[in-house]
Amino acid sequence: MKANNTEGLTMFEINVLVQQGGRFVIFPNTISKIFKNFKRSNIYFVRPEENTFKYALKHCFLNLTVSWKTFPWGPVYVIKSLYYLIKGGKDYTQTILEHLNRNNPSYNPDIKFLKYN
């Protein structure tokens, strides 16, 4: 599982950002090939003051151009995907945090040894 926008962040920093309002969201995509639909999704970490529009726009164009071609489920999946794009993504914060905390060692710095300039 690869989450975008978490490069250089420790688990402690991710947990602090989530407590401040950050979240992990998924934007579903459906790619249609002649008789088959392939579902996939990208995971993004959205920081507390960040808007999801810039991530959703790319997926919106992808869904509208490539996803509708397979009938009858292609248009159904496009409508479902557009619903989540308008909503700001499908929130998977708790699921991904549980996975990260289970698979990564926790890092809790000792506050009294931190120096502030």
Image: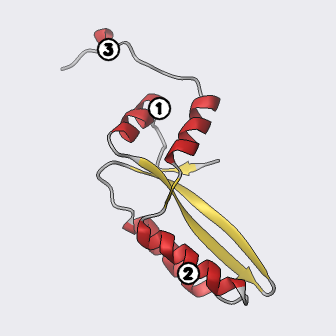
Task: Label 2: state its secondary structure.
Answer: helix
- Residue that appears at 44% across and 65% down: 55
Q: Camera-side residue: 97 or 12? A: 97
Mark 2 or mark 1, earlier in chain: 1
Query: Residue 50 appears in which quarter of the rendering?
Result: bottom left
Mark 2 or mark 3, earlier in chain: 2
Q: Residues within 10 Å of mark 3 (few under 14, many from 20)?
A: few
Q: Camera-side residue: 62 or 20? A: 20
Q: Residue lying farthest top?
A: 112
At label 1, the amino acid type is Thr
Rounded to the nearest angstrom, the CA distance separating label 2 from label 3 is 48 Å
Which residue carries the number 3 mark?
A: 111
Q: Is residue 61 left or right of residue 13?
A: right
Which residue carries the number 2 mark?
A: 79
- Residue that appears at 68% across and 84% down: 74
Task: Label 3: state its secondary structure.
Answer: helix
Residue 33 in picture, x, y percent from top left: 76, 83
Which residue carries the number 1 mark?
A: 10
Q: Camera-side residue: 94 or 102? A: 94
Q: Nearer the viewer's eye, disc 2 or disc 1?
A: 2
